Image: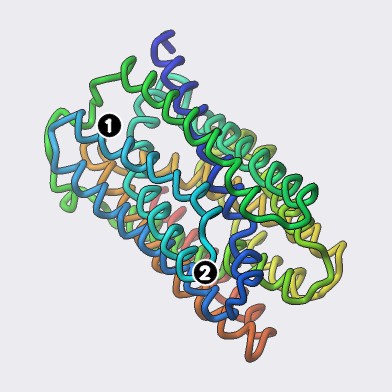
């Protein structure tokens, strides 16, 4: 791997590290902040809609990039996406639940716009090291930020006696650093290979890709969201203090970082069968959360991190291997959109069940993750 590409890869990793400090730090307590401001569980559940918009904007960003023959457009989408991270420190000024939702809207849309294009650039600069290893290392750096951010927020809440405004305002620093690192990456890698010619992308998305995307969507449908379900439930039950909620999320992000690289290396060697770890981890989480046991909460955070480490590493790397280079931005957009819609709908179901029949969350997750496993086995058969 040539030195220039290695520096670009490292800069993109640093971008994700500092960006994650901001939006994962803020996201770790968004649900509890909503409860602090007096929001209901159903209103807090609306935080899943910004996540849907994030994935819809990924579809838009991927489509725009795939139609464009301009590297300027690719990098422009990435820059716009990371600039919206300023929404996280602006939560310090939000005194109403509606304003929190609006700011999360802005941040999630930006995250969606940059996602497919950034992954295309990553797939290019990691080609020489192996995509599983490359995406795994990127996920490690990503989750290092996701670990440090919530830890800082947890400490800020602890020393300030739950002063959320103080905690959120600290997130301005990592946002600025992430943009500086992104500028260096863009200067060193100005020409994106996938931008060499526009492509509709649709004609080359194979049956294998669609089975893969549906399996991924089912995994997300049954996966409990931390932001609007788990953190809200923790504060509502009241067994643990607010700063401990962020601390548990820090644990989840730490586990994510630890498993990401081994998962990536395993993918390079064994292929998609490694992803079977993800649905198994996801279906165990609801029973642990609803047990109202602190030790079970810790285990749930560990399994939450295992799922994210496997999902974010393997699933992203595999898209690049399943489609042609000129169709990757579009494919990443489609894949992310379907997963996002599924996660939004699943989260809304869980928010409803949380207030009416909480055991139903366990049933919903078990069925969804079981179907995802079946489709994954089918996918492995199609690839052989």
The residue tagged with tag 2: helix, strand or loop?
Answer: loop
**Res. 373 image quadrant:** bottom right
Q: Does 175 sit left or right of 156 as displayed? A: left
In primary-sequence order, the first of circles 1 and 2 is 1
Query: Which one is in front, 350 or 215?
Result: 350
Q: CA distance from mark 1 to mark 2?
A: 34 Å
Most distant residue in the bottom direction: 356
Residue visible at 82% across and 74% down? 292
Label 1 CA crowd tier, 10 Å (few <14, some 14–19, many 20+): many
Label 2, on which residue?
Answer: 96
Q: Does 186 sit left or right of 262 as displayed? A: left
Give how far across and how far down residue 294 sits, in percent.
86, 64
Query: Which one is in front, 116 or 102?
Result: 102
Q: Is residue 268 above or below residue 102?
A: above
Residue visible at 16% across and 51% down? 203
The quarter of the image holding the N terminus is top left
Residue visible at 52% across and 78% down? 43
Label 1, on which residue?
Answer: 75
Q: Nearer the viewer, mark 1 or mark 2?
A: 2
Q: Is residue 69 above or below residue 26?
A: above
Question: Which label belongs to residue 49?
Answer: none
- Contact flag, marks 1 and 2 (Cβ < 8 Å): no
Q: Is residue 180 above or below residue 116?
A: above
């Amino acid at each position: 791997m040539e030195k220039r590409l290695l520096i670009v890869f490292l800069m993109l990793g640093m971008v994700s590290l500092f960006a994650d400090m901001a939006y994962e730090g803020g996201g770790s307590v968004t649900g509890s902040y909503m409860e602090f401001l007096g929001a209901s569980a159903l209103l807090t559940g609306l935080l899943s809609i910004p996540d849907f918009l994030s994935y819809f904007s990924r579809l838009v960003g991927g489509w725009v990039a795939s139609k464009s023959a301009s590297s300027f457009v690719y990098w422009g989408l990435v820059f716009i996406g990371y600039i919206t991270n300023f929404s996280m420190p602006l939560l310090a000024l939000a005194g109403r639940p509606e304003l929190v939702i609006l700011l999360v809207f802005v941040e999630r849309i930006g995250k969606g716009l940059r996602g497919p294009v950034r992954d295309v650039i990553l797939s290019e600069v990691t080609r020489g090291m192996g995509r599983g290893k490359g995406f795994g290392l990127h996920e490690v750096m990503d989750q290092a930020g996701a670990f440090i951010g919530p830890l800082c927020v947890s400490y800020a809440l602890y020393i300030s006696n739950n002063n959320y405004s103080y905690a959120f305002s600290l997130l301005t620093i990592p946002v600025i650093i992430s943009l500086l690192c992104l500028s260096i990456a863009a200067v060193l890698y100005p020409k994106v290979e996938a931008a060499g010619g526009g492509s509709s992308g649709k004609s080359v998305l194979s049956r294998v890709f669609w089975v893969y995307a549906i399996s991924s969507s089912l995994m997300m449908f049954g996966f409990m969201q931390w932001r609007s379900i788990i953190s809200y439930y923790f504060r509502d039950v009241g067994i643990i203090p607010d700063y401990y909620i962020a601390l548990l999320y820090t644990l989840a992000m730490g586990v994510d970082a630890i498993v990401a690289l081994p998962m990536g290396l395993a993918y390079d060697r064994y292929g998609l069968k490694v992803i079977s770890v993800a649905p198994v981890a996801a279906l165990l989480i609801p029973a642990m959360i609803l047990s109202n046991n602190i030790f079970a909460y810790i285990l749930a955070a560990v399994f939450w991190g295992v799922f994210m480490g496997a999902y974010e590493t393997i699933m992203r790397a595999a898209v690049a291997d399943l489609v042609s280079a000129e169709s990757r931005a579009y494919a990443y957009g489609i894949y992310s959109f379907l997963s996002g819609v599924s996660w939004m709908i699943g989260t809304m179901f869980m928010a409803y069940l949380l207030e009416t029949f909480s055991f139903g969350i366990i049933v919903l997750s078990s069925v969804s993750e079981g179907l995802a496993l079946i489709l994954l086995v089918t996918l492995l058969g199609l690839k052989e």
